Image (cartoon, rainbow, N blue to C red):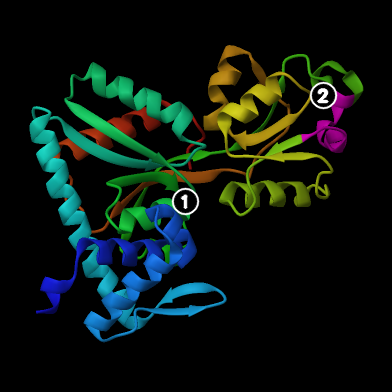
């Protein structure tokens, strides 16, 4: 029987190529060679007697048969991972594990609070935290590699089989160090936006949703592409560079809030109306939360309700 010949490595390789759209990228993730990936896929396609991917200059794209196979392959691998995790949980005296995907712009402020909330409630739950871009996290959620995602509202095409629950609306801020010329110089402070081109801007990475919002904000105010930029989603890098230079950090309020509250950084007196982006919980539509997952979800909702960010 065909199902007796299909091995875990076939499914693992297939899902890696489907997720990354490239045999080369899948090989890197799986720590094997590209020829090994190609050979494994060929074996699987021969066993199934169908072509699972169309390979071309744009990478590897699932065929209709490949899309049908992926739904069941993902569930099979997920079931195996859950079985292994259940054994691990039993070995660790029943401690439940919840795997959370979260944007790098949200993780620095939310994850520490979530861990403290779970500890204070006396919950015997462990977290596995993965950060990444929104599309990457949603793909991992669909393939059941993640239990839930804390991210931004995605295009409808990316939400098939998923549900989105709004938590808060996160506006952007322009953060600078205390004593920055845009604050201390009366002439510059009177119209800080007009003088932004004189300073290095720390911006979200190209291709992200918040970078699109930043570009739209600048364009709407007649500001062209900045001459000097640092593009990063690393809160740590941006925080330290902003605190020790005259750079201006363009980032979501939630990520910058701890520095603003402590006085380490200051928000420029500029209206950021219209820059709010929806942040929420994305779950699989067929998800029936376990007790541990339900406790984590409740804790996240409680923290978001107390955060004091702009509500949509």
Q: Quadrant of residue 52?
A: bottom left
Placement of the N terminus among the 4 image quadrants:
bottom left
Which element type, helix, strand or loop, lies under badge 1?
A: helix
What label sits on residue 134 in the rendered view?
Answer: 1
- Is 9 on the left or on the right of 54, as rendered? left
Using a 10 Å C-alpha cutoff, classify the residue at mark 1 as few (fewer than 14 neighbours), some (14 to 19) or many (20 or more). Answer: many
Using a 10 Å C-alpha cutoff, classify the residue at mark 2 as few (fewer than 14 neighbours), some (14 to 19) or many (20 or more). Answer: many
Q: Earlier in the sequence, mark 2 or mark 1?
A: 1
Query: Quick check: is 192 in the magenta stretch?
Result: yes
Q: Main secondary structure of the magenta part?
A: helix
- Is 103 on the left or on the right of 281, as rendered? right
Residue 252 in the image, given as x and y percentages of width and height: 58, 36
- Is 124 on the left or on the right of 157, as rendered? left
What label sits on residue 182 in the rendered view?
Answer: 2
What label sits on residue 145 in the rendered view?
Answer: none
Residue stretch rendered in magenta on the structure: 188-200
Query: Quick check: is 197 in the magenta stretch?
Result: yes
Q: Is 185 located above or below residue 159 in the figure?
A: above
Q: Tell me how far mark 2 sits from mark 1, CA to CA.
A: 33 Å
- Is 242 on the left or on the right of 94, as rendered? right
Query: Residue 194 or 148: which is nearer the viewer?
Result: 148
Query: Residue 18 or 222: which is nearer the viewer?
Result: 18
Residue 166 in the image, given as x and y percentages of width and height: 39, 45
Instruction: Name the residue rendered at 13%, 35% in the picture.
Output: 89
Q: Quadrant of residue 139?
A: bottom left
Query: Residue 38 or 185: which is nearer the viewer?
Result: 38
Instruction: Name the residue rendered at 33%, 53% in the picture.
Output: 141
Residue 286 in the image, given as x and y percentages of width and height: 21, 58
Residue 121 shows up from this direction:
yes
Which element type, helix, strand or loop, lies under badge 2?
A: helix
Residue 108 in the image, given as x and y percentages of width and height: 47, 29
């Amino acid at each position: 029987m065909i199902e007796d010949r299909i091995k875990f490595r076939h499914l693992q390789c297939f899902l890696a190529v489907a997720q990354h759209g490239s045999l080369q990228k899948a090989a890197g993730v799986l720590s094997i060679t590209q020829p090994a990936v190609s050979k494994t896929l060929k074996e699987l396609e021969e066993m199934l007697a169908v072509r699972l991917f169309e390979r071309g200059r744009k990478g590897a794209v699932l065929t209709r048969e490949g899309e049908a196979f992926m739904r069941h392959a993902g569930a099979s691998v997920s079931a195996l991972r859950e079985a292994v995790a259940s054994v691990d949980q039993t070995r660790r005296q029943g401690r439940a594990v919840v795997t959370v995907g979260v944007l790098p712009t949200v993780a620095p402020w939310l994850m520490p609070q979530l861990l403290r909330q779970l500890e204070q409630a006396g919950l015997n739950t462990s977290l596995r935290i993965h950060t990444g871009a929104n599309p990457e996290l949603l793909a991992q959620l669909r393939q059941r590699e993640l239990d839930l995602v804390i991210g931004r509202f995605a295009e409808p095409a990316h939400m098939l089989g998923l549900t989105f629950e709004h938590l808060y609306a996160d506006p952007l801020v322009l953060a600078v160090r205390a004593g920055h010329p845009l604050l201390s110089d009366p002439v510059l402070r009177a119209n800080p936006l007009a003088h932004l081109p004189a300073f290095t801007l720390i911006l979200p990475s190209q291709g992200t949703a918040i970078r699109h919002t930043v570009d739209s904000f600048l364009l709407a105010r007649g500001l062209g592409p900045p001459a000097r930029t640092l593009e990063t989603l690393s809160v740590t890098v941006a925080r330290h560079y902003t605190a020790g230079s005259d750079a201006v950090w363009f980032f979501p309020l939630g990520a910058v809030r701890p520095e603003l509250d402590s006085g380490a950084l200051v928000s420029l007196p500029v209206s950021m109306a219209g820059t709010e982006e929806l942040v929420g919980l994305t779950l699989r539509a067929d998800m029936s939360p376990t007790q541990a997952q339900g406790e984590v979800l409740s804790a996240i909702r409680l923290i978001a309700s107390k955060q004091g960010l702009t509500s949509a």
